[in-house]
Amino acid sequence: MAQQVSTPKGTRDFGPSEMNRRNYIFNTIKEVFHNYGFSQIETPAMENLSTLLGKYGAEGDKLLFKILNSGNFTDKISKESLEAQNYIEITNNISEKGLRYDLTVPFARFVVQHRNDIVFPFKRYQIQPVWRADKPQKGRYREFYQCDVDIIGSKSLLNEFELIQIIDDVFAKLGISVTLKLNNRKILSGIAEAIGEADKFVAITVAIDKIDKIGLEKVEDELRANGLSEDAILKLRPILTNKGNTEETFKLIESIIGNTETGKAGIEEMNVIFNYIRKHNLGINVELDLSLARGLNYYTGAIFEVKANDVEIGSICGGGRYDNLTGIFGMKDVSGVGVSFGADRIYDVLMQLDLFPKQTDEGCKALLINFGAEEESTCIEIAGKLRKQGISCVVFPEKSKLDKQFKFADSHNIPYVIIIGENEIANKTATIKNMATGEQNNIPQNEISKFIE
């Protein structure tokens, strides 16, 4: 009986047409990154667990894919650990590496490791897959691509505004209507202090980060489970249910946390960023959203999240300021800020809204029909000239019925078919068929490239 084959849950294969569309996304994003002076790097798919653990919070650590050590990985496990089912100790002994959870922590490790080769501020972008042992569902995968752009080695809030400009440019080029939501972790810290629960800051941010997914009632249940008093939850409720515009939200938060040192600093930072936004025209809607938390522990300042306006899906871009992520690796006081574009969710949005340009489905520009040895030789020569002129083309590999060759062109979304038979060879011409319209033109062979262009 033949073995049934499939991809692991939460992963996918991508065929030629899907890769054409994905590359359209990657190339669009890369073009914008280059326009703002960012340089590309890559890091390994796997990192030492010591690099990854403790950077994403307890929930993030649970979602790390761990890699078994080579050889007899059970050597270091004691009988007592096995009997006690001490999975933490067992895991530490059988696994030293893991697949990267995001691109930001590996980037921080890269900066520390290559500090002598980097000139600050360092502007980098990175487009690579990441892995999370999450429950697969619509818009959420276990393997997915992130397109990260970061500026490290500068505390200037102009960097935040530049990232907002990049977000604006990327989604304008892709044709997606979006809303950018902004908040600040200092504001969240001020809120925790103002409601009398400063020591539960992490629990509060982790819980309210889920409000769009599980709703207010379940968020409040989670806060109670983490020990928040009913009085604290009552004080927090106006913030979580706030529906005011940005100016009204500024007034609300100033009235609540304006007297706290950390909260005041967060409000001042957001005022600077929104002043940039007010002075310079942007195509996207930008809102101050007090319920935005971004659950990752390393964020310390402004945080970003982008939602598509016309499709029900999770965030398609997010990020924030991190003041001392490199300090974990021994390089203190190096502040950075960055955002990550979720290529897979962006793909889903473009598909649902039918926004991919039609040319992204084209495999190559032309197919040359194969009638036999003599015609094939002429086709090979013409194909070589076309390729040198930057026109992608393919010669059908064998003499076959015309119907079969035309079906090949149609199935590969090839827009032009070049027909060179005995008459065309004698007259040094070519018959070109437009596959979309069915129109045929007979032209000199030396004008093929001009005609296709």
Image (cartoon, grey):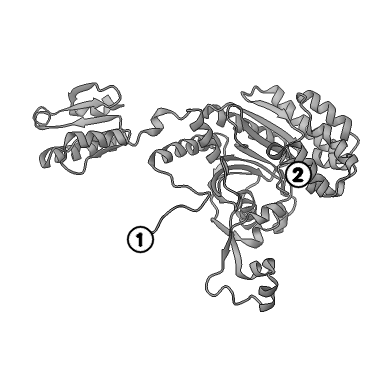
Instruction: Give the CA distance from mark 1 to mark 2.
Output: 49 Å
Q: Is residue 346 left or right of residue 370?
A: right
- The answer to which of 35 and 55 lies nearer the viewer is 55
Which numbered marker is on residue 54?
none
Which numbered marker is on residue 1?
1
Type of the residue with mark 1: Met
- Circles 1 and 2, Cβ within 8 Å, touching? The answer is no
Type of the residue with mark 2: Ala
What element does badge 2 sit on? Answer: helix
Q: Is residue 408 left or right of residue 127?
A: left
Percent x, y for residue 332? 74, 54
Percent x, y for residue 228? 86, 46
Q: Is residue 298 visible?
A: yes
| Quadrant of res 247 | top right
- The answer to which of 200 and 333 lies nearer the viewer is 200
Q: Could you tell me which residue is drawn at 60 percent across and 37 percent down? A: 316
Return the residue at label 2: 207
Q: The N terminus lies in which quarter of the figure?
A: bottom left
| Quadrant of res 406 | top left
Q: Is residue 426 left or right of residue 198?
A: left
What element does badge 1 sit on? Answer: loop
Name the mark nearer the viewer: 1 or 2: 1
Q: Is residue 442 left or right of residue 323?
A: left
Q: Which tag, 1 or 2, sits closer to the chain's start?
A: 1
Q: The C terminus lies in which quarter of the figure?
A: top left
